[in-house]
Image (tube, rainbow, N blue to C red):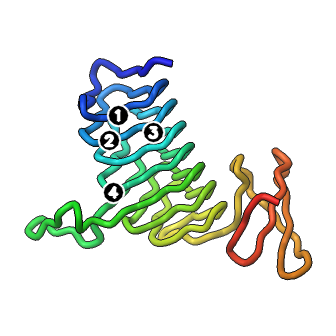
Amino acid sequence: MPITIHSTAEVSPKAVIGDGTKIWHNAQVLEGAVIGENCVIGHNCLVGEVTVGNGVKIQSNTDVWHKVTLEDYVFVGPSAVFTNDLNPRAKYPKTKEEWLPTLVKEGATLGANSTVVCGSTIGKWALIGAGAVVKGQVPDHALMVGVPAKQIGWVCECGIKLEFVSGSGGQEAGSCSACGRKYTKKGQEVGLA
């Protein structure tokens, strides 16, 4: 599939863009960016020197700064915010080497206007609610809301909230009411059964 770049977008010739990716109006893709196949970069987005996996959707008005990694099928809602410096000062700028990385793992969703503080890792298929502020480690399949973000449950790969029942050996079992996927949970670890 061809790459689609709107005429008002600014894309560095030194960026790597995968087949089937669409870059909408007024977006900027900087030198060093690596964007996978079949991605959507919404209008007014900036993609810096970062790695973006396949099938990622970055909605409008979102800047993805240096040291952020988005794995395959990540969804970034409109006006989401990433940081890369825990204590920025205009008078005392840090080098890129001093900034902290952020990793958003496969399939995770960041709701509209959510903020991810640098140094965080968002687990696979986790769902971060709109407006939440995340700092730290988020388990796979966790449902996080609020400021600061707190976990209020677990979600299926398809995004539906999961319910678990106690089983043997401290392990719990659950299944998705929408798609039927079956899961196990032990402590803070959730995975497919």
| Residue under pointer 2 | 33
CA separation in Å, label 1 and label 3: 19 Å
**Amino acid at pointer 2:** Ala
| Up-down relation of residue 27 to residue 139 (above or below) | above
The crowd level at tag 4 (other Cα within 10 Å; few <14, some 14-19, many 20+) is: many
Which residue is disc 3 drawn over?
59
Residue at 22% of width from left, 60% of height from top?
Answer: 96
Residue at image x 42%, y 21%?
3
Residue 99 location in percent, x, y?
27, 65
In the rendered view, tell whether residue 154 sits above or below residue 70: below
Question: Which element carries disc 3, helix, strand or loop?
Answer: loop
Q: Quadrant of residue 191?
A: bottom right
Q: Are marks 1 and 2 in contact (CB under 8 Å)?
A: yes
Q: In x, y percent, where is residue 64?
A: 35, 48
Q: Residue extending furthest left?
A: 91
Query: Residue 67, which numbered label?
Result: 4
